[in-house]
Amino acid sequence: MSKTPNTRLSLLMQEADLNQAQLAATVAVVAAEHGVRTGCDRSSVSRWLSGTTPRPPWPALLLEALARRLGRPITAYEAGLSSVRCPVTVHGLSWEADPLRKLAALTSAQADPDRRRALTTGVFTLTALAVPDATALARLGVGPPRASASGPGRVGHGEIEHMQTMARLFAQAAEEHGAGHIRPSLAEYLNHSVTRWLHAPASDTIHRQLLTSAAQLTTLFGLMSADDGADALAQHYCRVACHLAADADDMVAFAIALRAMSAHAHELGHHVRAVHHLAERATDATRHAPPSVRAYVHAHLAVMQAHDDRYSAIASLAEAERLHDRANAAPGPLSAYPRGALYYQRAQTLTTLGDKRESIRALTASLHHRAPGERLADALTRARLAETLLAQGHLDAALLHWRGFLDVYPLLHSARATRRLDAMRQFLRPHRHHPAAAHLLARATGIRHRPR
């Protein structure tokens, strides 16, 4: 049967000023970011234009490639991939939707294998980084009708304390073991307990505090999803966290969610203006926040600024260090900022600025300040230090830290740690005839293929 040419895709290509080869190359870049290495070339685009609908994951990758080029979200209908008109939304969850409904939908999907697979294998999209300001979000969030603080089924300070305790426990477990085995439990807690409490009768004050705690837990789930390699899912949750924080009128929680989104995108290799803008907004939103939170956002801002503004990066880093010296926050997953983490971001900034020697010093200091429970952070820091030492020609010193990394790796279930393991194998392959390097490569191969 003859196919109907996809004129809508053709019009989008004209608007984006892309020919078939250029679109194929743009889609291939997005595909490579998501671990899809082959399958898109000029002939693929030609088939799509002739009316052939691409099989998953190519529709999502194509829409993201077009969105990046055009600077706006593109729907399947606009690209001629669907006959159903739908509003322009990111991930099918618009900002106009009630954040409590979105949280319930996301968490309940974790119990459905098909819906969970669709969420966890989705495409990380730069258009999702466009977050409305907190005031606009608060106007959109309606939430459930709330009763007074009296009556059956009401919630209060006990539920808030419970959520804060669980946030500490989940964060500690993820830091010690990686997010892989912890994330499902947090999803169940959000679905079965937190969403129920958010819909229960409460005073306005209690409800706002519940929203803040829910925003913190949701941000934590986003961070854990990123650590587990579920990058699109991480975006889902961080966006919901922004909305919950805005409804709570809590600018600190809002800023931390923005910072989480920016740091996640940066770690995936995106340094575009939208990522930088989130870091700036997080800093602006915390002008009256405790010093530990301000240090946390300024340090990340320095990392982002290092890509194009050396003077500003150094100034932001100095401000982060000054604020950290004044910090006295109580321990907590989103209230305290460990010194080891500050040194790690100092190293990130200096590496981007090209100062590898000082970056090595900062990473060494970061290791020195890591607490015993920071197993994942310790492993990632050792890996980065080894990579930086090798880049400076210090093979033996690098091998020492990679050995420490391999000692810890089997105890972790973390996609970020696995990426560093794969990087280690790549970096050491040219040195495979060195006895100690060969031994580490053999250890790494055995670990990589072991069921986890």
Image (cartoon, helix red, strand yellow):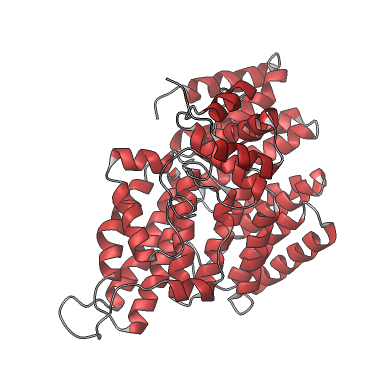
User: Camera-side residue: 362 or 152?
Assistant: 152
The residue furthest right is 311
Is residue 332 something one can see in this rendering? Answer: no
Q: Residue at x 27, y 45 (%)?
A: 111
User: Camera-side residue: 21 or 5?
Assistant: 5
Q: Residue at x 50, y 69 (%)?
A: 253
Looking at the image, is 107 positioned above or below residue 357?
below
Q: Locate residue 247, reporting x and y percent.
A: 43, 74
Q: Dividing the image into 4 quarters, which one contains the N terminus?
A: top left
Q: Locate residue 288, reporting x and y percent.
A: 61, 80
The residue furthest top is 433
Looking at the image, is 264 positioned above or below residue 2?
below
Name which quarter of the figure residue 306 lies in: bottom right
Query: Is residue 179 rendered to the left or right of residue 67?
Result: left
Query: Is residue 191 rendered to the left or right of residue 286?
Result: left
Q: Dividing the image into 4 quarters, which one contains the C terminus?
A: top left
Name which quarter of the figure residue 424 lies in: top right
Name which quarter of the figure residue 143 lies in: bottom left
Number of numbered discs present? 0
User: Camera-side residue: 348 or 332?
Assistant: 348
Q: Locate residue 61, reporting x and y percent.
A: 54, 37
Q: Locate residue 352, reporting x and y percent.
A: 77, 47
Looking at the image, is 118 positioned above or below residue 234?
above
Query: Is residue 394 rendered to the left or right of residue 289?
Result: right
Query: Is residue 402 rendered to the left or right of residue 2?
Result: right
Looking at the image, is 295 positioned above or below residue 86?
below
Is residue 164 something one can see in this rendering? Answer: yes
